[in-house]
Image (cartoon, grey):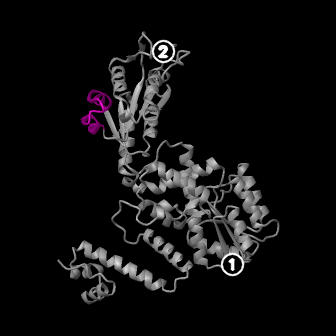
Amino acid sequence: MKPIWIVDDDPSIRFVLERALARENLPTRSFTQAREVLDALTDLAAGDAAHQGPQVLVSDIRMPGGSGLQLLEQVRAQQPGLPVIVMTAYSDLDSAVSAFQGGAFEYLPKPFDVPKAVELIRRAVEESQREEVAEHQQAEAPEMLGQAPAMQDVFRAIGRLSQSVVTVLITGESGTGKELVARALHRHSPVAGGPFVAINTAAIPKDLLESELFGHERGAFTGAQTQRRGRFEQAEGGTLFLDEIGDMPLDLQTRLLRVLSDGQFYRVGGHAAVKAHVRVIAATHQDLEQRVKDGVFREDLFHRLNVIRLRLPALHERREDVPMLTRHFLQRSARQLGVEPKRISDAALEVLQRFAFPGNVRQLENICHWLTVMAPAQVISARDLPPEVLQPGTPTHAPEVAGDEGWELALENEAQRLLQYGRPDVWDALARRFESRLIRTALQATHGRRMEAAQRLGIGRNTITRKIQELGLDDVLDE
C-alpha cells in the first residue's frame, strides 16, 4: 500500500499521526514544509524508484516555505484524484472555505481527536482506492457496468454471441441501455470492423421512414433531387440497429421482412435490387407478443427478429449496481463539465438505492449530471439529492423500509417548514400525525384487529386503545 504523506512543521503533530497510523498498519512519510512535498512529487515524476507516491496527503495550512492551501492547489493540478486533508489550528471560516474550494477531501481543525483523525484518513484511503479503480476502469473503457446477476446474464450472452451475426431482439424499459447493448454486440462480433448505424423508427415520420431505411432514387418523389443511400446501405458490412421497432408502420414491416428473408431491397423509386450484407439488431420497450395479438405487428416479422432475445433489467431490479453507476456517472459528468468530480455519501447512496427510477439508468445519469452542477458541497449528502428522489410518496419497489432515511428527510423538511412559519406546537403536531399514520397503517395491515396491531407495533392494548381515542381513530374497528 502507498504511504500517507504528512506535512506539518510541528514535530509533535507528525509524531502523533505517525504512531497512530502505524498502529493501524498504515505506512507514512513525513515532511516539514510544502516545498519538500513538491520536490518529492517532481522526483516521482522523474522516475524515483526509492519511494512511492502518496495514497493520501495530510497537510497543515500555515507552514514556512509555502501554505498548505497553495500546496493543495499545486498537488491537485498534478494529481487531481489524490485526497488531501487540510489541518489547521486557525479554525476560521475563510480557511475552511478555501480548503473546500481548492478540492480538499476534508478540513481537520486542531487540536483533533486522534482516533477521529485516523478514521478520517481511513475514509480518504478508501476514497483514493476507489479513484484508482475508477481510473483503471476508465482506462479499460468499459462499455457497460453491472454486478447484478441479471446484468451478468446479459454480459454472458454478449460473450456467447461474439462469434455470430445472428439477429438479436433487445427488450427492456425505456432508459435501460438497449443501444449500449447493441453497440457492445457490434463491437464483439465478426462485423466489428464495419459501421454501426442506429435509427429510432419511432422518431421519424412515417412518410420519411421508408426513404431513411432504404434510400431513394433521384426523382422518386418531390424534392428527391439526388440519389440517396439509406441506413441499410450505410450499414453495409456492419450492424443496423433498429430502435423502437414496435412502432414501425405495418407496410414498412412488410418491406423489412422481405429484406431479412431475401437479403436484398429496393430504393424508393428504384428498380434494381440492392444486396444487404447487414446484421440487424432490433430493440423495443413494448410487448411485441401483445402487439402481434392486437394486429399491429406482423407475427412473421416478430419471429424473424426474435431469433435471440436479450432482456435488460430495469434499474430497480438491479439496485446493487446503483452505487457503482452513480460514481461512474459523477466521474463522467465532471469530465464533461471540466470540474472536479464530486463524491457521494453512503447515506445518499442508500436513498438512491431505494428510489424506483422510472427512467432507469438514463434517469440516474441525468441525476448525477444535476448533482455535479447543483450540489453545494464536494461531498453529496442525502439532502442534496433532487426533489423527485426525496419527495414523500415516491414509489421505491422496496418493502423493507426499516431504518430508511427517506421518511426521516421528509420529516425533517416538514419540521423546517413549520418552524419557519413560527408554529408554536411543532412537536405535538408532528407527533400526532406520526402516531396517527403509524397506528392506522398497523390497523389496516391487521384488518382492524387492535390486539394484533398493538403486538406488531410493540405497544400494549391499553396504549393503542387510548391513542385511538386521542387521535380520533375510532372509525377503525375490530373485525
Residue 12 in picture, x, y percent from top left: 71, 78
Compared with 145, 439 (above or below) is: below
Circle nearer the N terminus (1, 2) = 1
- Quadrant where the N terminus is found in the figure: bottom right
In percent of the image, x 36 and y 21: which residue is there?
255
Secondary structure of the residue carrying tag 2 is: loop
Q: Picture quarter containing residue 440? A: bottom left
In percent of the image, x 42 and y 46: which residue is there?
176
Secondary structure of the residue carrying tag 1 is: loop
**What is the CA distance from the residue labelled 1 to the residue labelled 2?**
80 Å
Residue 458 in picture, x, y percent from top left: 29, 82
- Residue type at the position of mark 1: Lys
Q: Residues within 10 Å of mark 1 (few under 14, many from 20)?
A: few
- Residue type at the position of mark 2: Ala
Left of 62 or right of it: where is 456? left
Compared with 6, 266 (above or below) is: above
> Circle 2 is placed at which residue position?
220
> Circle 1 is placed at which residue position?
110
Residue 20 in picture, x, y percent from top left: 60, 74
Residue 429 visible in the snapshot? yes
Tell me the mark number nearer the camera, choosing from 1 and 2: 2
Which residue sits furthest right?
65
Left of 254 or right of it: where is 220? right
- Quadrant where the C terminus is found in the figure: bottom left
- Please tell me whether the stretch drawn in magenta is mainly helix, strand or loop: helix
The magenta stretch is 288-307
